[in-house]
Amino acid sequence: MSRLLFSGTLVSTGVWEQVYAGPADGQTVAINSLYLINGTGSSATVQVRKLVDGFGIELYNDTIPDGVGVEITDMRLDEGQALEIQADQLISYTAYGTSSGVYRDPTRDVWFDCTSNLYQGGGIIGLEAGATRHLDYYVIPDTDLRLYIETGASWVVPVGHAIDADSIGLVIDSGADPVLSHVDARWVAWSKIGEASFQADLVNDAGQMPMDWPGVVYTIKQLQKNAVVYGSHGVTILYPVKEPAPTFGKQNIMLTGAMCKTAITGNENEHFFIDVSGVLWRLSGEGPERLGYEDYFKNLTNPVLSYNSYKRYLFISDAEHGYMLTTEGLGGGYAGVTGFWQDGGDGRFIGPDPVVVQPINIMTDVIDMGYRGLKTIESVQFGLNADDLAYAAVDFRYSKDAAWRTTPWARLTPEGVAFIRVSGLEFRFRLQMLDHEFCEISYLNIQYKKTDYRYVRSSMGVHHGNNPTPT
């Protein structure tokens, strides 16, 4: 079957232009059809010849009118021969045909040790070429790249798709079935024991495998005796197995990926990561644990997670926000952190700008005072021992399906009291301060009064007997 061999535009220079040379391109070519097209607006005198040992053999010599195409058929370029064209006007040319009789330059031979190859005698060759990208296609103006392989074994040929080209030809002459594949970012590989070599051999302690989810692999982290692969579309545990051969088995933990490659941290005993929906997870030898906090993390931009394993502090930050998770819960942290260094029990943060300390934020769970009617908060008292100023606020809503609203922040008095007056059905109470070093909270008292008696089914304000009437 004929295929495109070469094409282009011949500039009228009045000299012979060599448009194709068999041996120089490493092949013998049989040209089935050579099309010459004149679109200049006037007649063009065109000559075509085959150059053999420095002598020209004429194949075509005539005048082509404007808008007319001429076809020249059945020509062959053997080794040491070339095709030349000359014209006095601008013309276009296109050639279709076949190639055979591979020309080999022994100085460029590449040898493979097929006795130590996972692909049973095959080799791996990568291709890469560069040119200009135009929107969604690539152009190599005067280049036609080909790879010729002759072998009696099976070959695996991954073609790197960083190729900027509109015409890349691949010719395989093999006595076995070839396999064509491309570079895949969801594959992981492991090296030989004690060596930085990922090439499989007869020892069989190196290998590779694809993940079951699409996308790319972000990182691989050790978890006890296993390895955890974190990617853009999933999380998978690789565990060592001995049978039928030493390799890794895999178990998919999640088919939801991490938010970004920096949203993963941890040590050999536990990992933390934020998924694409903003949910924080903890992964240990007992399996994944959903920690949540997506209301805070879902809008972060490329968050960086850092872990102080000595104090078990997890730091989450992007350019504008910072949080710190401890065994007690989530609070304010440090914004702008891009790296963390463990220095004994303490830690050192790294960032492109001065690290911004975010306030400590503490929030209670939903509180309704054990009564489903409306009530009015009068003040909030904190049993607080801290060296810094503290502020309080109250979240409130009037029904269980309503959106939460928050009061302005009110500064606590030296006695720990915030005077906040707000009505609602349900409340959440907040405390904020900048001091991260010392803060103790022993209790929270809420002064409120009932303003809605719809759900009261007993007498109020009237007592009988010897008991006085309460006020």
Image (cartoon, rainbow, N blue to C red):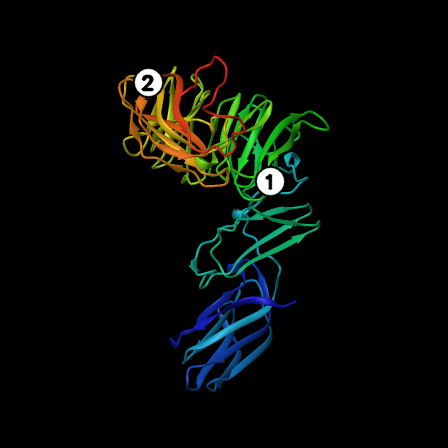
Image: 232 above or below 383: below
Q: Residue 219: in sight, yes or no?
A: yes
Residue shown at 52% from the left, 21% from the top = 268
Q: Quadrant of the N terminus?
A: bottom right
Image: 127 above or below 272: below
Q: Circle 1 sits on which residue?
A: 112
Depth check, front residue: 266 or 450 = 450
> In the rendering, at what x and y percent does residue 468 appear?
44, 15
Image: 137 above or below 209: below
Image: 395 above or below 414: below
Q: Which mark is residue 461?
A: none
> In the rendering, at what x and y percent does residue 317 appear?
38, 33
Could you tell me the amino acid type at mark 1?
A: Phe
Could you tell me the amino acid type at mark 2?
A: Glu
> What element does badge 1 sit on?
loop
Depth check, front residue: 340 or 197 = 340
The nearer-to-camera label among 1 and 2 is 2
Depth check, front residue: 126 or 351 = 351
Q: Which mark is residue 437?
A: 2
The CA distance from mark 1 to mark 2 is 62 Å
Residue shown at 60% from the left, 66% from the top = 3
Q: Quadrant of residue 30?
A: bottom right
Asked if residue 341 lies left or right of residue 370, the reply is left
> What element does badge 2 sit on?
loop
